[in-house]
Amino acid sequence: MSVSYGGQAVLEGVMMRGPAVWSVAVRTPDGEIVAVTTKVSSPMQRNRLWRLPVIRGVIALGESLAIGFRALAISANYAMQEEREEGAEGEAAEVSTEISKGQIIFSFVLAIGFALMLFKVGPALLTSWLPIDGTYLFVVVEGLIRVAVFILYIVLIGLLPDLKRVFQYHAAEHKAINALEAGSELTPEKVQKFSLIHPRCGTAFLLWVMVIGIFVFAFVGRPVWYWLIISRILLLPVIAGLAYELIRYAGKHQDNRVLMAALAPGLWLQRLTTREPDLEQIEVSIRALEEVIRVEQSESEDELRAESRVEVMA
């Protein structure tokens, strides 16, 4: 396939994204599946500069975070069983699925700040307090501490009962994309047979951000503590861009056994963030994916019709 699709699990649902459209599908408390579909406004579509290797990874990461927060807000409105107001004629009015820009920015800053402190600043400062001589040993120990903290964090949150269903929807997202890329019919029964692991998973991406960071930080050396913190934050976009290229390449070369063996730790780690989903959860992931495909195909057909009219007029 020439088009790559991705997504993420949300509360009682799945968000799927294509190049131009993203859609979040949620199972409501009354058993219905509702879907909200939105167009993607990406700078990569407007400027070739943002599509250059590494740079496109930074842009894609920022877009994914922004869309992810919006998708979570939409799913929360349904999963929390917000009551719909009755209209004047007794019909239920649609629940609002939009959150303010201020709420998105606040959530974004809070989440990013927490992640930077836990996975970047914390391990760097902890390593600086250890009696370690040598730059290379320092960055290796720092990297190992960072990976250990990351894995421990995943294990701990995996113990929360409420997150089990989120992890099931995460697996349902992977299965649907694996089925689509294999050319399979998108029915719950057939999608269920596919793997809950995918090379382009965000979990694998985060692991490789940490591993690649070891090599990048080796060029920085071991500066004083404040430059240590600044370097870990400022170099994060570069590391994320490199990790994006690696994951992107792996997604297009899944038949390369050597590459898959090298990326195996990231694939294994997904076992901690996925759980086997049921057919109803897979049905939700299929709905989100089909909505994205439907809208994108419709827009492509409209563009072709417009081009045909231009050619006839010429």
Image (cartoon, rainbow, N blue to C red):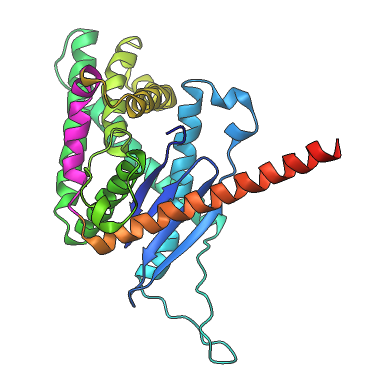
**Looking at the image, which is closer to me, 144 or 166?**
166
| Relative side of 149 to 249, left or right | left
**Residue most extreme to the front:** 312
**Residue most extreme to the top:** 134
Rendered residue at 41%/60% (across/down): 25
* Percent x, y of residue 211: 26, 22
Which residues make up the magenta segment?
Answer: 258-276
* Percent x, y of residue 291: 47, 55
Most common secondary structure along the magenta stretch: helix
**Residue most extreme to the bottom:** 89
Residue 251 drawn above or below residue 291? above
**Looking at the image, which is closer to me, 203 or 119?**
203
| Relative side of 29 to 35, left or right | left
Residue 175 drawn above or below residue 134? below
| Relative side of 240 to 141, left or right | right
Q: How many marks?
A: 0
Quarter of the figure with the N terminus = top left
* Percent x, y of residue 256: 26, 20
Residue 39 visible somewhere in the drawing:
no
Q: Quadrant of residue 64?
A: top left
Residue 150 drawn above or below residue 261? below
* Percent x, y of residue 199: 28, 33
Rendered residue at 16%/61% (across/down): 161
